[in-house]
């Protein structure tokens, strides 16, 4: 018997059966056979209830009757303030207790650009900075955030990083020695 069976059993006994019994009041005019039948039904229900109570006590002792933990996502990188060169690779990292996929977006103001859809339990994704799955033109700027959310429940289970910057790399020309 599992926990759901226990809850259903209590509902049947507590909500459906027991309220019906008082409606069948035993009177002195009823034949003894009907009275005996009702007493047996009550005894069966009491035994079932005792069995379910014992099961619950055993289940609680073994596993605890706790509610499952709240689902969450927490971005651990970028932390905010980073300056990532467009085209360089950086890990976007997070912690979560989700077992399904998560969607990673680059956010700038009201604009969102999808980066990837990956298994949440991986906890990281290596991103080629500035590139999105929609091939959007990402310009240098300091107003970028990463959003990670559960696509099955996007409004309730999501996380945003602090602002970070995407910059162009610096081009340096080293002096060269030419030999003729």
Image (spheres, rainbow, N blue to C red):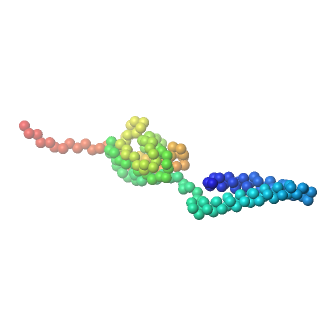
Q: Is residue 170 above or below residue 29?
A: above
Asked whether residue 103 appears in the rendered view, the answer is yes
Q: Is residue 159 left or right of residue 3?
A: left
Going by the picture, which residue comes out furthest to the left? Answer: 180
Going by the picture, which residue comes out furthest to the top? Answer: 135
Q: Residue at x 18, y 44 (%)?
A: 174
Asked whether residue 109 appears in the rendered view, the answer is no
| Closer to the camera in the image, 126 or 175 | 126
Q: Quadrant of residue 43?
A: bottom right
Q: Residue at x 63, y 63 (%)?
A: 57
**What count of labels does the image hold?**
0
Q: Which quadrant: the C terminus? A: top left
Q: Is residue 86 above or below residue 38?
A: above
Q: Is residue 169 left or right of residue 135?
A: left
Going by the picture, which residue comes out furthest to the front? Answer: 33
| Closer to the camera in the image, 137 or 58 | 58
**How far from the left and from the top, in percent, is residue 28?**
91, 59
């Amino acid at each position: 018997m599992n926990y759901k069976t226990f809850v259903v059993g209590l509902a049947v006994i507590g909500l459906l059966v027991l309220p019906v019994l008082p409606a069948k009041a035993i009177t002195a005019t009823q034949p003894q056979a009907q009275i005996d039948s009702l007493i047996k039904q009550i005894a069966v229900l009491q035994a079932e209830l005792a069995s379910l109570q014992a099961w619950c006590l055993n289940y609680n002792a073994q596993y605890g009757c706790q509610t499952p933990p709240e689902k969450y996502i927490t971005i651990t990188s970028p932390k905010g303030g980073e300056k990532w060169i467009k085209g360089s690779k950086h890990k976007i990292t997070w912690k979560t207790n989700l077992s399904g996929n998560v969607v990673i977006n680059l956010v700038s103001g009201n604009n969102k650009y999808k980066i990837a859809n990956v298994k949440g339990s991986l906890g990281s994704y290596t991103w080629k900075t500035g590139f999105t799955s929609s091939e959007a033109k990402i310009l240098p700027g300091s107003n970028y955030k990463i959003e990670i959310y559960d696509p099955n429940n996007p409004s309730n289970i999501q996380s945003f990083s602090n602002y970070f910057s995407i910059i162009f790399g610096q081009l340096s020309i080293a002096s060269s020695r030419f030999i003729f």
